[in-house]
Image (cartoon, rainbow, N blue to C red):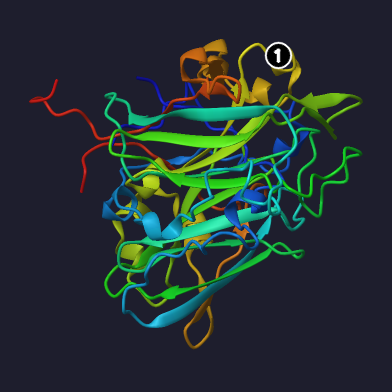
Amino acid sequence: MKQTPSQTAGPFLHIGMMPEGGTVPLVSPLPSGDPITLHGTIFDAESAPVTDALIEIWHPESGWARAPTDGQGSWRLATTRPPTAPFVSLWIIARGINTALQTRLYFPDADWPNDPAMAKIPRARRGTLVASQAAAGAYHLDIRLAGEAETVFFDLQGGDDQ
Amino acid sequence: MTPLDWDRHPPALTPGYFSSVTRSPRENLIPLNPTTAELTGPVFGAQHIGALDGDLLRNAAGPDELAIGPRIIVHGRVLDEAGRGVPDALLEIWQANAGGRYRHARDGYLAPLDPNFSGCGRVLTGEDGGYRFDTVMPGAYPFPNGPNAWRPAHIHFSVFGWAFAQRLVTQMYFEGDPMIRHCPIVATLPSAEAVDALTARYDPANDRPMDARAFRFDIVLRGRRTTPMEA
């Protein structure tokens, strides 16, 4: 059977994905790592903030969380630091994004230069995935959908399961 | 995991859909074999599903009230590419009301809100991957994309399988809708077959007679590679 095609989430994704009242908050348990905050801003090709996006993070050592961007294009998520992995996975949707974008946030104090995924990325672009430390337990990563300093996005190809 | 099938998914830059122009990466995607991080995903369960979450006719309605509009059932199965049902997949949906208006601060369309309809639903698939929503047929509505662009009636779906790499957001259309072939967002799809895969079929065998019409929409997620033993 062939895969069901993707379509944009459109501008009103909050109705279904950030419902107000009437439903149970969608949370997944956080592993017992150190609590951290991740934040950043999503920009479009003209460096305008993307104010109607939604970002999800996942790592089996770190749990799942999602947040919409606000009126300034900024997102903020509470999660836990993965004890061994140098990154968490990110998934981004918005009006104008036809197929969801997959990327990663690497922690600046982790051994990210030796992560196998980095070897596949041109050296000059690797830094687009590395967060900066904003405060104790707080990391900042801006995401640029297109244009100068465009964030690296991945096509998860299959291949051997690791 | 099987790779994303780019004969099925829309490319990032589709100038006919204006919003994609400033929101599409210009660089090629970097190929990456998924690791444990992407081959696992959050697990949701019955504790995340309220009693009326799958019933949009009633889940935002006052006592003894119902949402306004043609009553429909939307059902189907979540499957992998080998045709195996995906149990416990979380589906989140959102849609406009029967007049084509979303209950959203940024939707200013002329059609009125329905005080008894939020347009939000959530279910988990059963053992065989089956799911069902009760709702109203959403209305078509105009959107800013040139002088006169309309969305066909549609329902947005967000799907969680067992792996974060399977995460899918899409839209379901309705068989026979003349608006489908005029829509710039539908036109981002790479083939007529891809449009067909997003078009729910009228399914009279599953109607509730004298109550609601049924539409069938199966969702196929990328899946595990078939091992030689299974092939």
Q: Which residue is mark 1?
A: B181
Decide which of B154, B26 is in the foreground and name it: B154
Residue A125 picture location, percent across and down: 51, 54
Q: Is residue B178 left or right of residue A35?
A: right
- Is A126 located above or below residue B14 in the figure? below
Above/below status of A34 relative to B110: below
**Taking the image as drawn, is residue A149 in sight?**
no
Q: Position of residue B3 (x, y in %)?
A: 35, 32
Question: Quadrant of residue B100 in the image?
Answer: top right
Number of marks in the rendered image:
1
Q: Position of residue B96 (x, y in %)?
A: 72, 38
Q: Quadrant of the N terminus of chain A?
A: top left
Tag 1: residue type? Answer: Arg
B119 relative to A144, above or below? above
Whole-percent x, y for residue B58 in the image = 63, 46
Task: Give the residue displayed 60% in from the left and 51% down from the top.
Answer: A150
Q: Secondary structure at mark 1?
A: helix
Disc 1 is attached to a residue of which chain? Answer: B
Residue appearing at x 42%, y 71% in the figure: A107
Residue at x-position 51% and y-position 77%: A37
In-front residue for pair A90/B169:
B169
Can you see residue B81?
A: yes
Residue lying at the far bottom of the rendered structure = A136
